[in-house]
Amino acid sequence: MKKALILGTYVNPPYHPFQEVDGVLQTLLSPDFEITPTDDFSFLNRLSDFDLLVSYIDRFDQELPVGAGDAILSFVKQGGGLLCLHNGLSLQTDPRLFRLIGGKFLRHPPQRELAFVPTENGFLANEPGFTCSEEPYQFGLSGEGITPLLQYTFEGLTCLGGWARETGSGRIVFLTPGHSADVFRIEAYQRMILRSARWAAGI
């Protein structure tokens, strides 16, 4: 069985408490992964013990601990999988991880009902779409090898809602939905998360 480390923010998260979603993610991923949920960044020193890193950290306004960026870069370079969910994109505070992931969060208008639809050419293409109350994240993209996975319509424009990319033998996925725990209980989204985790981990 593959092993996954889920990294979130339990104590004083600005917007996204990990304790509201960690149990849902553990249940969702447990058929394929042995799960370790934590807010302890020292686990990144042991990433070689894992096949997948799931980021749900909430640190847009804080730098990562010393050595965290190096550990994640080395992990992915050596073939590890990285799955960033919603605020997990805050790994971008290390500019090298922005380039690794392929994009960074810039801003979002107020939360509203959004319909997320898989793109035709990504590995989620055959999954059903879903609608949820979500923040319409807007991104700056690195433009390097991104495969769109999800899209949604906002004020008449088609917007990117998730993507995948490969670098060397490593695989990275980012999915926009995840502002609240309720989003993670949507069956269609759970299927997308599980498929993304499997793809990133090489299952």
Image (cartoon, rainbow, N blue to C red):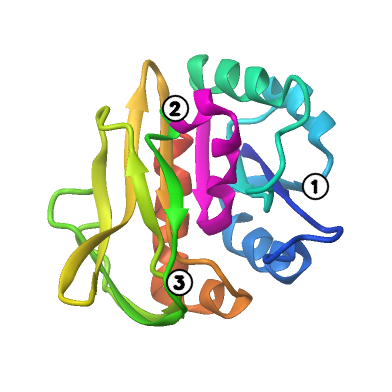
Circle 1: residue type: Thr
Whether 87 is drawn above or below 94: the answer is below
Residue in the foreground of this view, choosing between 54 and 132: 132
Residue picked out by circle 3: 135
On-image quarter of the N terminus:
top right
Residue 147 at what x, y percent from top left? 23, 41
Residue 114 visible in this rendered orientation of the protein: yes
Of the numbered discs 1 and 2, the one sitting upstream in the chain is 1
* Nearest to N terminus: mark 1 or mark 3: 1
Q: Earlier in the sequence, mark 3 or mark 2?
A: 2
Amino acid carrying label 2: it is Leu
Q: Nearer the viewer, residue 9 or 24?
A: 9
Which residue lies under the disc numbered 1? Answer: 38
Mark 3 and mark 2: Cα distance apart in space? 23 Å
SS for callout 2:
helix
Label 3 with label 2: CB-CB less than 8 Å: no
Contact, CB < 8 Å: mark 1 with mark 2? no
Magenta-span inclusion, residue 91:
yes
Quadrant of the rendered structure where residue 130 is? bottom left
The residue segment tinted magenta is 80-98
Measured Cα–Cα span from mark 1 to mark 3: 25 Å
**Three-letter code, disc 3:** Glu
Q: Is residue 80 visible?
A: no
* Residue 5 sits inside the magenta stretch: no
Q: Quadrant of residue 165?
A: top left
| Residue positioned 58% across, 15% down in the render | 74
Instruction: Say which of 12 and 182 sits in front.
Output: 12
